[in-house]
Amino acid sequence: MRTPFRRASALAAILGLLVAACSGGASPSATTAPPTATASPSEAVSPSPTPDACAAENLETKTAGKLTIGTDNPAFPPYYAPREGGNTEPWDPEWGDPTTGEGFESAVAYAIAEHLGFAEDDVTWVVVPFANSFAPGPKDFDFDINQVTFNEERAQAADLSEGYYFGNQTVVVAEGSEFEGATTVSAFKSAKLGAQIGTTSLNAIEQVIQPTQEAGVYNTNDDAIEALGNGQVDGIVVDLPTAFFIVNVQTEGNVIVGQIGEAAGATPEHFSLVLELDSPLTDCVNQAIAALTDDGTIDDLIAEWLPDATVPELQP
Amino acid sequence: MTGPIPGGGGTILTPSSGRRSRILDVGEGRRAIAIAIVSSVLFFSAIGLVIVNSPGWPRFQASFLDAEVFAASWPRIASAFWVNIRLFLIAEVLILALGLVIAVMRSLPGPVFFPLRLLATAYVDLFRALPGVLVIFMLGFGIPALRIEGVPIDPFFWAVVALTLIYSAYVAEVYRAGIESIHPSQAAAARSLGLSQLQSMRHVVLPQAVRRVVPPLLNDFIGLQKDTALVGFLGVVEVLKAAQIRQSATFNFTPYLVTALLFVLLTIPMARFVDWLVARDQRRAAVGGR
């Protein structure tokens, strides 16, 4: 798609130059000719003001005509859903398969792809470990969708899109724990809390709760959940939808105590898509998210895939 | 070799062991020293210039040598290093004891000790074969998951156990090499004096064997120092985990440099200490084993 367009514009530029050269010539008859001759090339040279700049065929994707989307493996529900009859390779057979279009993030990803004009078959998925997705450097995806919470430091290393989900961090503890009935973050001062490394969950422990005991810092959420089950930590901090998945599906005997929101002094959070720094796609993806938010598509997907139970906000 | 250096000082530095270092031996005479100095200065300056002027250098500097990040991450990383040192010191004592027991079990002669030899051999084979991370995960997450009353759940405790189990297998083999290096006539002589099998091991063989294997033992302990970082897998914020936390917050690799520096600072004095021990033993042997 790219090459013919480039060729056309190069041709147009040469044509324009030729015309300009002609107009500088002695022939007086040429002076009347240029306006009509330059009119069509100038349109081909600068198509950006037209809405087509974000059309699939004009986007500078990693593979022309295809949209490559990244997420981590395993891809967990409720963000991703398993495929009936077995997941495709390389997606962990126990959990979700992003290629189904089912599960919140898979559905949002395909909605964005469709809005940009990519057919379902033009979408390919790659495995991108969580912390790698927003680390500086070149990316092998057009965008990554993996519950990446926006923060300033990450935004300096990669492009982060507008939010497609607004939610808070939550504390999960074991049923019957002394912290089960906590209504404030200060109730957790004496607790041993755990979170995954490099997450805003860990920031919430260190900057909002500030417990006296050092937090347990795990390489994955699953390790943190393991430590919770073993009693090695009193509670873990995770995103709200992840918390629902942990207490409803992944484990038994754990409960969500509350959200760490603005009431507790935390800044409001949202999930962003990750793109390469200064990616040519960022504006188009943001336009797509804005359009899908305005027409209610994203709200519908939230209602379809994410639990709607309300979780109380912890007080300071 | 404490007197003046023969040959007009052709050797820059003479190790106290009396052997010349191959690296530092530049040949005889002042001319040789001058050439060595000039060639070293030119060589390292050239390498330095190439590195500093390479296209990636500014980016490397920003990513690995950021003074601000260094200063900001130093206190937390350095205090996390205390976890590694505690782990190392406790495990080292346990390893020295368990390793010796296993080595002795494996070296006991006679058919009656066959079960002990079998057990010790199986132990060494097993724990040298298993990756350290696997043992750490199995014990640190696996055993507490059994929820047995009275069994500790502290990840630090299980890290000590895991490192002791793994490194005792290596250390037992080092001890065994030392035991087997003692000539059988020594044990035979001890037995002829009326010492029992265990007495001859305790008073004749082991004292000589252990002295011989001090350098390889300390070599294993340098490995142990570095493997203390494995406890990070269990959620404990040790030095490498502390560096990772800073790295993932800043996308700057300087915190890793801080960690590298701490490990080097810990290891180099130990390496020099081993050199000194070896030199001292050789000196003693030279003057008649006093």
Image: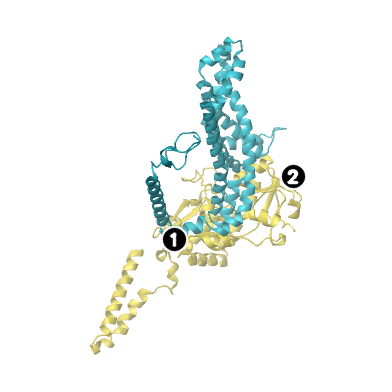
Chain colours: A yellow, B cyan
Q: Which residue is mark 1?
A: A118
Q: Residue at x 47, y 46 (%)?
A: A88
Q: Residue at x 72, y 48 (%)?
A: A191
Q: Residue furthest left?
A: A27
Can residue A107 be seen in this snapshot? yes
Q: Which residue is mark 2?
A: A177
Where's residue B266, x and y in %?
58, 43
Left or right: A175 as drawn, with respect to B111: right
Kind of residue sitting beneath label 1: Phe
> Do the residues marked 1 and 2 share a common chain?
yes
Where's residue B168, x and y in %?
58, 29
Q: Residue at x 47, y 59 (%)?
A: B59
For the C terminus of chain A, which image quadrant? bottom right
Q: Chain of mark 2?
A: A
Kind of residue sitting beneath label 2: Ser
Q: CA distance from mark 1 to mark 2?
A: 49 Å
Judge the density around disc 2: few (<14), some (14-19), many (≥20) Cα neighbours within 10 Å.
some
Judge the density around disc 1: few (<14), some (14-19), many (≥20) Cα neighbours within 10 Å.
some
Q: Residue furthest bottom?
A: A28
Q: How many marks?
A: 2
Residue A95, by quadrant, is top right
